[in-house]
Amino acid sequence: MITKDKTKQSTYYESIIKQGYSRRDFMKFVTYISAYLGLENSMVGQVAKALETSYRVPVIWEHFQECTCCSESFIRSDHPIVADIILDKISLDYTLTLMAASGHQAEAAKKATMDNYKGEYILCVEGSVPMGDDGNYCCIGGRSAKDILLEAAEGAKAIICWGSCACNGCVQAAYPNPTEATPIHKIIKNKPIVRVPGCPPIGEVMAGVIVHLVAFGRLPELDRIGRPKAFYSKRVHDTCYRRPYYDAGLFVESFDDENAKKGYCLYKVGCKGPMTYNACGAMKWNNGVSFPIQSGHGCFGCSEENFWDNGPIYERLTGLHGFGIESSADTIGKVAAGAVAGGLAAHAIAANISKKKELKESISRGKRNEKALDS
């Protein structure tokens, strides 16, 4: 039975030390996650103190229409303490995917958390909720996903939606959406909701949201559609290492051409990086090794609303706002080429003017020297 007796609970720091990590490991983790959150160096101490003194936040983690890739991303985080924070240190009291208990034991653990920590626990949701056919498309233990969600959300302090399924419906909601797959924010209206989209989101992003909540006692600053600004304020395009090729008008025309081998920009073969806000290019995946564009595939735009219906995946956008005007990739290439040519011409003119000026000065100095010698 889960109780509120805090004398039997551990703080985050105490739990981390019990797991065999050192104080040095703890401070490395604090610095690491603070940097990902975009915090100043002066805030590292505050985050450390919060984790040293705060008791673990009870978490209920529900799964509905999804593929479990968000949980998979979480447990494969770059930093080992990240996984421990999620799987143990936040007091993960209920998750069908990772908990050892099942059946009545699992449901009893969830009910105990909802009863004993009403108004205090965090509800994490992975997956969309099918509203069609009275919810019969996704039933767990004879209950619809909608009923389970409403019950778990009632006593939650806040809700965190993991992944595009919970945030925007993902591919299940693609036209014609036969199950009426619905994101969480369109069902729950009376609770603070953080949306962490991606298919899946990056593990460190997920951990960062939890740590921010623990360290500051409030949700992180969100953008207009409820995403944490620390991770979703820049376009994938802005941090992409192929961006210089885009600016120069150098594009891959097909996935097997020479330009693809040279690593040119993937915009023309459908990359949605210029319209997608996410931290993929900056944080990357698999211990910071790579991300889809670096692996040779264009961005799907999975962290954006309706990405599955925003046009064919392998066709470029017909127009793109850039350079102060709406331009196609071809126009951008021409403008870039023209700019380069113009720049070379301007440089040549400037160089000629400079040389003429130097020549005149040299002649003047020579005449002055001659006069000085004559005198």
Image (cartoon, helix red, strand yellow):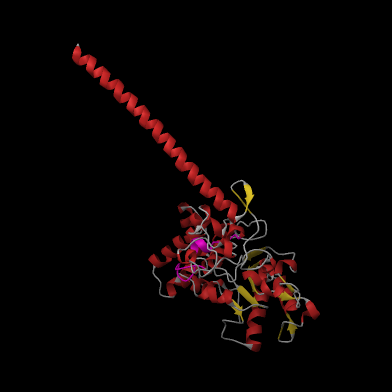
Q: Which of 9 and 156 is in front in this view?
A: 156
Image point (58%, 76%), residue name: 69
Image point (63%, 47%), residue name: 325
Q: In this view, does 53 lie to the left or right of 105?
A: left
Q: In which quarter of the image is the N terminus?
A: bottom right
Image position of 132 with respect to 241: above or below: below
Instruction: Tell which residue pokes out farthest to the right in this image.
Output: 133
* Residue 8 visible in the picture: no
Image position of 333 with respect to 252: above or below: above
What type of secondary structure mainly makes up the magenta span?
loop
Image point (54%, 77%), residue name: 72
* Quarter of image, res 262: bottom left
Q: Nearer the viewer, residue 304 or 102?
A: 304
> Which residues are the magenta region?
276-291
Q: In this view, does 375 lie to the left or right of 216?
A: left
Q: Is residue 360 left or right of residue 1?
A: left
- How far across and down, in percent of the image, does residue 250 sit? 51, 57
Image position of 38 with respect to 112: above or below: above
Instruction: Tell which residue pokes out farthest to the top in this image.
Output: 375
- How far across and down, in percent of the image, does residue 167 sit? 66, 68
Q: Quadrant of the C terminus?
A: top left
